[in-house]
Image (spheres, rainbow, N blue to C red):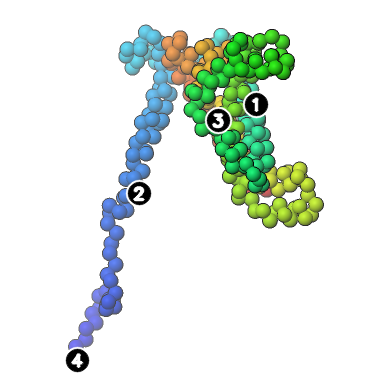
Amino acid sequence: MIDTTTTGSAPARAPGRPRPRRRPRLAKALPYLLLLPALVAELAVHIIPMLVGAWMSLLHLTQFFIRNWTQAPYGGLANYRIAVNTNGPVGKDLLHSFLITIAITAVVVGCSWLFGLTAAVLLQRPFPGRAALRTLFLVPYALPVFTAVITWRFMFQRDTGLVNALLSDELRLTHGHPFWLLGDRSFAAVVVILVWRLWPFAFLTITAGLQSIPADLYEAAAIDGAGSLRLLTRVTLPLLRPVNRVLLLVLFLWTFNDFTTAYTLFDQPPAAADMISIHIYNASFITWNFGLGSAMSVLLLAFLMVVTLGYLGIGRLRGRHA
C-alpha cells in the first residue's frame, strides 16, 4: 500500500471544486485609476490655482510686473497688513464690504430657508395641482443665472421697469419712481434677486427631507391632540435638523461667495451692495494690484474655512448631547 500523504504539503483539493483565482492587479487598481481624472482635474482647477494665489499674496505684484509676475519683489505679509488695517483706506473699504456681505447673507439665508420651509410644508400633503406648483417653484433655480439677473435688471429700471410700475403706479406703496440700482436701495435689489434664486433650492432640499419623516409620527401626534403648529415645532423641525444643518451651510457659502449677481446687475456696485467678491475683483483687476487682491482672497478663504469648521463642530457637539 502506497502512502500518498507528505509532510508539509498543501491539503488535497476536493474533486470538482474550482481552484480560486487570484485577483489581477489591474482589477485592484481600477477604482484608483477611475478616480485619477477627477483628482487631476481637482488639482488643475482648484488646488494649484489656490497655491499660486497664496504665493502671489506675498508679492508686490502690481501692473509693473504683469508681463513677468515671477520677478515681482517679495513683500512677505505686507499685503495682509494693508488689508486688515482698518485705519487705512484699503482696510476700511474691505471691512465695509465684509459687513455689507454679512448683512446680505444673513437676510438672504433667513428668507430663503423660511420661504422654502413654508412652501415645502404647505405642499407636503397631496392635492390637485401640487405637481404643477412644485414645478413652478423650481423655475427660478433652473434658469441660467445671467438670464435671470438681466431680466431683474430690466424690471428694476426706474421709468420702464415692472417693479416701479407695480409698487408706484398700481399699489401706490412708493412715492414716485425710486432708483433701485443706485444708492441704499441697491441692497434691497440684491437681496430680492438672491432670495428669488436660492429659495427654490431650500424648498427642494426640505421637501426631500420631509419625505423621510414617517407618516405614523404625524398620525400619533394628531391623535394626542397636537395641532399644526405643534406638529411643526415638535415633529417636523426636530427631524429636519440634519437637513437644515447642511442646507444653511450651503446657502451661506453660496451667498457669501456670490459674484455673478452683483457683477451682472450693476455696472459698478454702489456702496450699499459692495459684496466682498466684487470688492476683491475690483482690487485685483481694476486697480491692477494682484498681490493685494490675492491677500484679500486668502483672508476670505480662511474666514469661510473657520466658519465652516466651527459650524460643523458645533453641530457634532449638539448631536452627541442630543
Rendered location of residue 266, percent (x, y): 53, 14
Contact (CB < 8 A) between labels 3 and 2?
no
- Closer to the observer: label 3 or label 4? 3
Is residue 8 visible to us here? no
Spatial CA distance of label 3 from label 4 is: 89 Å
Residue type at numbered disc 3? Pro
- Closer to the observer: label 2 or label 4? 2
Please give the residue where the numbered disc 2 appears in the rendered image: 31
Q: Earlier in the sequence, mark 2 or mark 4?
A: 4
Rendered location of residue 64, percent (x, y): 37, 8
Circle 3 SS class: helix
- Closer to the observer: label 1 or label 4? 1
Front residue of 294/18: it is 18
Q: Earlier in the sequence, mark 1 or mark 3?
A: 1
Spatial CA distance of label 1 from label 3 is: 18 Å
Give the residue at the far front of this rendering: 128
User: Which labelled disc corresponds to residue 1?
Assistant: 4
